[in-house]
Amino acid sequence: MNDAADVFQPLQADDPPVVAGYRLAARLGAGGMGRVYLSHTAGGRPVAIKVVRPELADDPDFRRRFGREIKAARRVRGAYTAELIDADADGTPPWLATLYVPGPSLAEAVHRRGPLPAPAVLWLMAGVAEALAAIHAAGIVHRDLKPSNVLLAADGPRVIDFGISLAADLTAYTATGAAVGTPQFMAPEQAVAGEITPATDIFALGQTAAFAALGEPLYGNGPSATVLYRIVHSEPDLSRLPEPLRPLLARCLAADPAHRATLTEVVEWCRRELGPQADAGGGPAVWRDITGPQATIPEPVPDPGTALTRPLNTPARTEPLIAPVRATVPAALEPRGSRRRRIAVRTAAGVTAGVLLITGLVWQARQNTDDTRDRDTASSSTPDPTRSGRSAGSSAKGADAADAAAGNSTEEGASPSPTESGPPRAHAYPQQRLDEDNSLYIHADKPGTRDDRKGDIRLTCKEIGCALESDSSHMVQMFGDPGTTFDECRLLLGGAKGDEFRDWTLTSAAAGTEYCVKHPSGDIALLVIQLKSTAMWDTPGMSSLYVDMTVWPAA
């Protein structure tokens, strides 16, 4: 925090100078949801403006969830949260403003100075626990608590991004193909797409505290599939942690959500361990030592004298908490939720879907020769058997996943290690179209789509959006870098049973999103989305997917 250049980056050519009347002074950073900028209220108070990526802004489902999260986040009031003060889910693009917290993130602080001492970790846990209590009281589960979402102010930690977690759907990719959530800080139930509850945030709190104490993720680094496997199937190694932290972190990291510590228990434990320091208010001194001197915040950008208005097709926000100086648009020009606007949005979405579909078909026609060659190559005797036939993942990635599974090959029902006898030969089936009237076969004489709903995988669109579903096969979405291998699919799906992993939402999936599928026969498939058209999921017959499929038949 000694150099303002480390914190406040100048605006680039592709950065807007103004967002909804807020004049931008500097760029603060970027993430899976979008870019973050420094601005000021009309009274000069610094605020952080988060502008949603265009790819997400074009998703009607995202806008609806984003709007609901904004309404809930407005109710959050806590000493250890960065308060949401302004937002517009219907803006072009959507955005939100929170109070600016002058201080580095926990991730940045640990990167610069190394692991924190045990007392600082206890202060950290107590502050974050209080922040989570305020967030949960507003009916929100954060879902993405991690070191980069904890800012260290001079008087204690602040939890951020609690108002956009559900909108982003952390178990899925963003429209850019990057995971919003960080696998190293997911809870087991989140990693397997199970039920998300406030206890999910308790697990993430334990992981975040462990990172602060160790200087690295508790479950290690490496391919996302390997890390998630460790979180779901192994006990955390707490022996490296300072002894005063171990009992509390063990409670937070219990595999069963019902056995995890409550937020009240976390705060009480931390106060008990801190002893006299807790009553003497020693926290601020701890944070000043960790964060160092604060960088000078840039001054507000002066108004050039021209009143700026919103685009006329952007509805005015209601009940702003702190309004910047801006010209207003008469409400008559901005009808909210009118039938005319709904028809216009649907028409635009339909035209866009049609253009994308035609583009996909043209692409397919142009690629017929190459696709045939790919299939011949995949069926030959000299393929790289750990590749999907489509992605360029590294061989080290597959090796790491296989290493994580070592020791499991002697369990009942375990598959033989592909490194011992060689994995099955891969077969490629590019550009399979999946819609609400057909289905996708994995285990068949000729895998691919069929004109009925009796296949292994179906596209189903219901009242909350579209999903991939199956009555027979298990599936899981892959996180991290593209290029999922046979070893990784086999690793994550090896223990699936019963009704686990029978469906997976497509809410924020986009081109490049990968799904591993395992059929009861032992066949394993990798589905890679190439084209998604689900924007009009509430209109029957309007949704479809194009996927590239690679199948590894059972030995």
Image (cartoon, grey):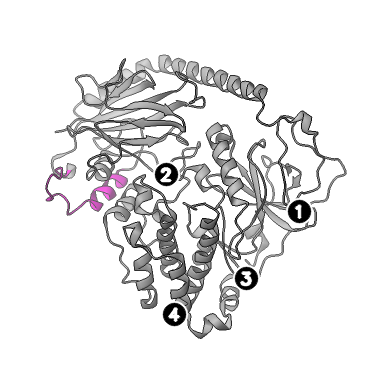
* Mark 3 element type: loop
Is there a contact, CB below 8 Å, between mark 1 and mark 4? no
Query: In the depicted view, which residue is nearer to us: 224 or 533?
Result: 533
> First in sequence: mark 1 or mark 4?
1
Q: CA–CA distance between discs 1 and 4?
A: 41 Å
Query: Which quadrant holds residue 251?
Result: bottom left
Q: Residues within 10 Å of mark 4 (few under 14, many from 20)?
A: some
**Which residues are drawn in magenta?**
395-417
Assign the C terminus to one quadrant of the image.
top left
Q: CA–CA distance between discs 4 and 3?
A: 22 Å
Q: State the image coordinates of residue 194 (x, y, percent, origin top left).
A: 36, 46
Q: Is residue 399 above or below residue 245?
A: above
Q: Amino acid at mark 3?
A: Ala
Kindly identify which residue carries mark 2. 171
Kindly identify which residue carries mark 3. 154
Kindly identify which residue carries mark 4. 273
In the rendered structure, does residue 409 fall within the stretch colored magenta? Answer: yes
In the image as oriented, which residue stretches furthest toward the bottom?
276
Q: Residues within 10 Å of mark 2 (few under 14, many from 20)?
A: many
Q: Is residue 419 above or below residue 533?
A: below
Q: Amino acid at mark 2?
A: Thr
Q: Nearer the viewer, mark 1 or mark 4?
A: 4
Which label is found at residue 41? 1
* Mark 1 element type: loop
Picture residue at 39% right of the left edge, 44% below the top = 479
Q: CA–CA distance between discs 1 and 2?
A: 34 Å
* Mark 2 element type: loop
> First in sequence: mark 3 or mark 1?
1
Q: Residues within 10 Å of mark 3 (few under 14, many from 20)?
A: many
